[in-house]
Amino acid sequence: MAQVEKRGGLLRKSSASKKPLKEKVVLMYDEIFMTEDPSKCSPRFWEELFLMKVNLEYLEGKLESLDGEELMKIKDNINCLFQHCIQALGEEHPIRVVNALQTLCALIRGVHQKNKSTSGFDIINMLMGFDKAELCMKNLMESLDSLLCAEGSESLKSLCLKLLLCLVTVTDNISQNTILEYVMINSIFEAILQILSHPPSRREHGYDAVVLLALLVNYRKYESVNPYIVKLSIVDDEATLNGMGLVIAQALSEYNRQYKDKEEEHQSGFFSALTNMVGSMFIADAHEKISVQTNEAILLALYEAVHLNRNFITVLAQSHPEMGLVTTPVSPAPTTPATPLGTTPPSSDVISSVELPLDADVQTSNLLITFLKYSSIVMQDTKDEHRLHSGKLCLIILTCIAEDQYANAFLHDDNMNFRVNLHRMPMRHRKKAADKNLPCRPLVCAVLDLMVEFIVTHMMKEFPMDLYVRCIQVVHKLLCYQKKCRVRLHYTWRELWSALINLLKFLMSNETVLLAKHNIFTLALMIVNLFNMFITYGDTFLPTPSSYDELYYEIIRMHQSFDNLYSMVLRLSTNAGQWKEAASKVTHALVNIRAIINHFNPKIESYAAVNHISQLSEEQEIPL
């Protein structure tokens, strides 16, 4: 008996003398792509079609091969296929429903790919027809809502979510996807919440549900009233919010785990041995090779949750005992179209596995710790535009957290101490910190550590000005809370002061290059104002009187940097150039710092001259 092969919709016998035979479903697709109604000659055509296994590759390829005129000629048949797909979703036979869902995915993606340059209204007309679009989409969304909420097959629910993700992500700009107007009108918000609040459904579909919600929230969010934004902002169900937080934590934790695995693999390899022999000359280049694909979709979901729903803030500090549960998927999902860009979920075993402990001695973790660790990885390399945007989103999320009163309360809570192992960029002039020696501290210390780390490691030619501004803003908001609530945080403030002064030195030494691209005086003013906060209000939040001494010592020790800054801004503020006003603001802000320097410097110089000391130590200066 001749062997039969299946390739591209063809059933081809091994005998070369025979013509290749097509699958029946492919023949039926060919009939749809004719100008005549396929059901005229075969009344049971549509019933039989959905009993056939879908050939996604052939169907999408066929749509792609047609030009605009050819596609318009078969518009009625495409409309008919779309409508019969929706009707099949109401069938009791699961095979029909599965095939209808997959066919809809292929149709939606195929028509959009073919009509990228056309308007959304043309695509609606091509898929459904203007006159039937409202009813079609109403029926489609109701069917999907019913399937998602029913206690049926988990694989069907998975396909429903894949279809919705396909529908949402077919255009590069989500706000240009006009079909989503019908998704706004016929909301599936409650179905998404039900998935997140129900542990078995969440383990199976939580990732897709969270990503879908994040995308829907971003549809024309600044142009019109988006019902998903309104509904998400008022969710107060604890199980739902915890479920959303758990899904996000697991996805971020999986990224952290993958990065850690690659880092360990890299460190144990030949290149690591080589760099040790040559004194780590190439450590920065070696580090660039450690790369794991970032997850912007889940990061966007975290931002929307933190930004829109104040109740979600409480989830950030909660540990997740469910992360230890291991479950087996109810049933394998059938073959689905490719996952939309940026929505790749973690593997199924990760969704139900516990997050790796941050350290052997640490028993618990929470979403905020996982996010801080993720941010410390992503923000290391901002030379790549993709990672630059990820780093920016991380800082925006941190800004939202730093602005929230309740978030600040648990960030600064002395009873909530954690050992947070942030990733530090390898640098030639410093050794890698020993993870075991990390102290348990309030979470705000980890946030400040992350900001200091960013400040120290990103002084480069391609200066990320926007990220630096956001970084300083996060520090400023945390200090404002400490001042307001008189929180005396035991933190190594000198590291922050030193980082800020070094940043000022970098801005001055690269004045010409940076001014061609950025207004560096905005950043310089923010830095000087941080010092002014410490000088003027430090007595309300610095931990000890000696902290004030350390602050003054650091200012006096680095007085040359502040003198140089004053000379630079004075020069530009007295000239009638474009930076006159911005430079003048920095000049005025330097009054306190210059007063300290002018008061102590003459005394120090006199003391050094009398005692024949070329350079005073900290202990010698402070009594002055």
Image (spheres, rainbow, N blue to C red):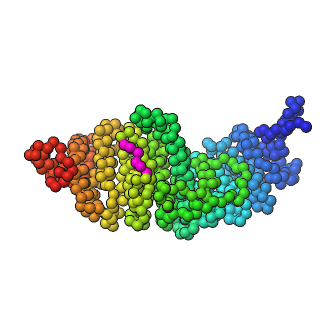
Q: Residue 622 in the image: x percent, y percent?
A: 19, 54
Say whether residue 255 is magenta: no
Q: Quadrant of the C terminus?
A: bottom left
Q: Is residue 180 visible?
A: no
How many discs appear?
0
Front one among 496 and 13: 496
Image point 50% across, 44% down: which residue? Answer: 263
Front one among 40 and 529: 529
Residue 610 appears left or right of 209: left
Residue 504 appears left or right of 78: left
Q: Residue 573 in the image: x percent, y percent?
A: 24, 44
Farthest-out residue, right: 1
Image point 29% across, 42% down: which residue? Answer: 505
Q: Residue 439 in the image: x percent, y percent?
A: 39, 57
Q: Is residue 14 visible?
A: yes
Front one among 594 and 183: 594
Quarter of the image where one finds residue 12: top right
The rendered magenta stretch, by its main secondary structure, is classed as loop
Quarter of the image where one finds residue 189: bottom right
Residue 553 appears left or right of 117: left
Image point 31% across, 41% down: which residue? Answer: 506
Q: Which residues are magenta?
A: 430-435
Farthest-out residue, top: 17
Say whether residue 432 is magenta: yes
Q: Quadrant of the N terminus?
A: top right
Q: Residue 412 in the image: x percent, y percent?
A: 38, 63
Farthest-out residue, left: 610
Farthest-out residue, bottom: 237
Residue 583 appears left or right of 402: left
Image point 79% across, 62% down: which residue? Answer: 92
